[in-house]
Amino acid sequence: MAKPLKTITGTVKGTVEVLVKPVVGLVDGFNFLMRKIEERTGEKKEGPEMDGFVNILLKEMKDAEQGVLAFFTEMMFMQHLSEKMAQVENEITLIQILGDKINEFISPDFVEIFLCGADGRSFHLVYHFPSEKEFSPALVKNLALDCFQRGESIVKEKVKLEGKGFSILAAPLRTTRERFGAVVVGKRGKGVITTNESALVISGAVVVSFAMSNIKLVNNIIKNQRLVTIGETIGGLSHDIKNILNNLENGIELVDMAAESSNSEMLREGRKILRNSYEKMKHLVLSMVDYSREREIELVPSNINSVIKGAISIMKGTCKEKRVKIIEELDKHLPIIDIDPSRIERMMINLLDNAIDAVEEKIGIIKVRTRFLVSDGAIEISVEDNGCGIPEENLERIFDIFYSTKGNRGTGFGLAIVQKVVKEHNGTIEVKSEVGKGTVFIIKIPVKERGKNG
């Protein structure tokens, strides 16, 4: 909890005095020594000059003490302000912190903070202390508005508010480029706002102003990023859906023509196109839901090899159609581990689908391996293909949503979902690729040993 200015001033003063006293003592000692020499020699030729020098030196030492005291006090105020500001999320919270800190450090009779509206014309009160009422709203607001428009601090002494005299400071909330509002601080009666207190208020206003500017900048960046993401999402989805609809249209035309001509071969071809298009649409919709939905994984003790074999079995039809060979090199001594089988299966299907698309017909080979890394306490899964490979400059983007190297055949969801599943299981994924030779994805899933083998 922040200490009041008086307490902090006392602490700082004690610290400064510890630093200054040895120097003052040295001067006093020097002065005493010179007097002793004068007494013994009877000479006092340079006494007045020496006394003047010592007095000036002492005065400068005291001035330095006050300067150090003011500096440390201001630094402590800024530290308290910074600690609070690290937790803020919006402008009003910043203003609240500034107002509260001014109250703690200089004990004013009132603090009122005004902000300029988003329209650039309105000027409204957002903080006032005491919270029960505002002090002479019209006069204080006019002073704040004048301070805001001029962009300079204003100090007024013996201002009459509600029949009482006040010392008032108005400090602008501004950076070198932007203006946000103004802070008005008042002390009643004979108490005036000191130079140190003015420095605290003005410094605090500057710090908060730059923080507000940063919040505004970050909000604009987030807003722009969201717009870009929405644009990419709409663009990616519309492109994929358009391709699927075109295929559906072609399939419907073939079915219609087959119905009119009683051509069974054409009917089968049309049905095949419709079926494939339906599967693509289904896959796209499920991928969208899968990627966007936050869900808790359901961990159950599982044999990861069995899950991988199930995924390979699902993809066998696609492999057969493209005449691609899958080689299984699965470690028979893997421990039973806690995983979400449906999510791991989904991950493997997407990796296999990616590999099948990367290899050429007839000569394509995909190797799926598992092994237990005892020293790492993890199961390693690798999916390797002898396909086209991925250019080095594209490797950092392959897990981005809607990024696909498959052209019209890809949705850009596959590897993004793979990465999501790996993260869900606290695992890691690594990609190695060489253009023209192939790609390997290496996944490590951490294991809690159960003492059972699969």
Image: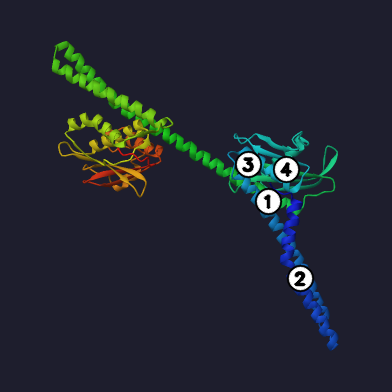
Question: Is residue 416 among what the camera can see?
Answer: yes
Residue type indicated by callout 4: Val
Q: Which residue corresponds to mark 1?
A: 77
Residue 414: x percent and y percent?
32, 34
Q: Secondary structure at mark 1?
A: helix
Q: Which mark is residue 184?
A: 4
Q: Mark 3, mark 4: which one is toward the viewer?
A: 3
Q: CA distance from mark 4 to mark 1?
A: 18 Å
Residue type indicated by callout 1: Phe
Q: Residues within 10 Å of mark 2 (few under 14, many from 20)?
A: some
Q: Which mark is residue 94?
A: 3
Q: Which residue corresponds to mark 2?
A: 24
Give above or below for 272 relative to 190.
Answer: above
Q: Earlier in the sequence, mark 2 or mark 4?
A: 2
The quarter of the displayed image where residue 147 is located: top right
Q: Residues within 10 Å of mark 1 (few under 14, many from 20)?
A: many
Q: Earlier in the sequence, mark 1 or mark 2?
A: 2
Q: Residues within 10 Å of mark 3 (few under 14, many from 20)?
A: many
Q: CA distance from mark 1 to mark 2?
A: 28 Å
Q: CA distance from mark 3 to mark 4?
A: 16 Å
Q: Pick whichever, 413 or 305, lies toward us.
A: 305
Q: Earlier in the sequence, mark 2 or mark 3?
A: 2
